[in-house]
Amino acid sequence: MAGLMAGFGHYTHAVVRGVPQSLAGDALRINQAEVDAGAAQKEHHAYVDVLKRRLGLEVVELPADESLPDCVFVEDAAVVCGDTALITRPGAESRRKETELMKDTLKNLNLNIVEMTDETAILDGGDVLFTGREFFVGLSKRTNQRGAEILADAFKDYAVSTVPVLEGLHLKSFCSMAGPGLIAIGASEPAQKALKIMQQMSDHRYDKLTVPDDLGANCVYMNLPDMGHVLLHPTAEEFPETVKVYEKLKDYTLIPVSNAEKVKVDGALTCCSVLIYKKPSI
Ligand code: GLY
């Protein structure tokens, strides 16, 4: 099995996309919830601002498309690892066209593009957990075995294991990487069961950071020059007990980022950006 990739968590660029007004009425959601598109736009603006101004990433901002109500959740349209971008075939038909602009954007960033063209395959990036050593792919309503196989073909340097997603939308609706070798995981039984499966599949012993709220386990880890370990995590207004757990992490720059509106349509922090590392050209 591969060791920890060099530069795990290093990023220079982020791709994000605006929030359309149509998110309020038409974005997919598991639970019926009223959503204020204006509030989601404001919240997203603050998220993008953190990436750009606080962290100094080069942010490519794609315009919202009113005909694609879920388009802000860019993570589902592409999986980027190293110089390769796998353009996915999202599980929800209403989201398939989100990949078009993503493909052009990642091509313009000089990534090697692999497209998931097999019509029997589905995969949302929200179901893909890359640990820096291997991939775990959630088998959910949005991602199937064929999707996972195509991902494995695209990223041949890494092992790929599948994990059933028994609750919530995606694998990363209850887990994410909170550091090298550190998996943030919700405390619910389905989340803990999924972690157990991941641990059984792996040769590596991951540390776990259990947080009381499953949705609170979705955070964005980066390792940035001059800053070191950085973690974007939910706010204390949303998940007070979960934030207490993050606050125990030593030597991290902890940045609470509100996601209270987008979570009503099952969007989490990782969903709202595609993160990329590009070597500086000499
Ligand atoms: N609203 C995010 C999704 O269902 O794909």
Image (tube, rainbow, N blue to C red):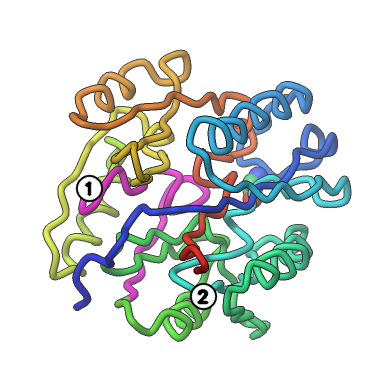
Q: Which quadrant is the N terminus positioned in?
A: bottom left
Total marks placed: 2
- Residue 169's spot in the image, x, y percent? 52, 49
Up the image or down, 220 lies above or below 82; here it is above
Up the image or down, 199 lies above or below 263; here it is below
* Quadrant position of residue 165: bottom left
Give the spatial CA distance, label 1 vs label 2.
24 Å
Picture disc at residue 182 = 1
Report helix, strand or loop for mark 1: strand
Q: Is residue 51 left or right of residue 131?
A: right
Q: Is residue 172 magenta?
A: yes
Picture disc at residue 84 = 2
Label 1 is placed on what type of residue?
A: Leu
- Residue 197's spot in the image, x, y percent? 23, 61
Mark 2 surroundings: few (<14), some (14-19) or many (≥20) residues within 10 A: some
Residue appearing at x 58%, y 37% in the figure: 52
Report helix, strand or loop for mark 2: strand
- Residue 268 visible in the snapshot: yes
Up the image or down, 16 lies above or below 249; here it is below
Residue appearing at x 48%, y 82% in the figure: 154
- Residue 270's spot in the image, x, y percent? 50, 45
Residue appearing at x 61%, y 78% in the figure: 113
Region of the chain picked out in magenta, as a range: 160-181
Residue found at the very far front of the displayed protein? 282
Q: Is residue 235 magenta?
A: no
Q: Is residue 227 left or right of residue 121?
A: left
Residue appearing at x 49%, y 63% in the figure: 280
Q: Earlier in the sequence, mark 1 or mark 2?
A: 2
Label 2 is placed on what type of residue?
A: Thr
Picture disc at residue 143 = none
Q: Is residue 193 left or right of residue 174?
A: left
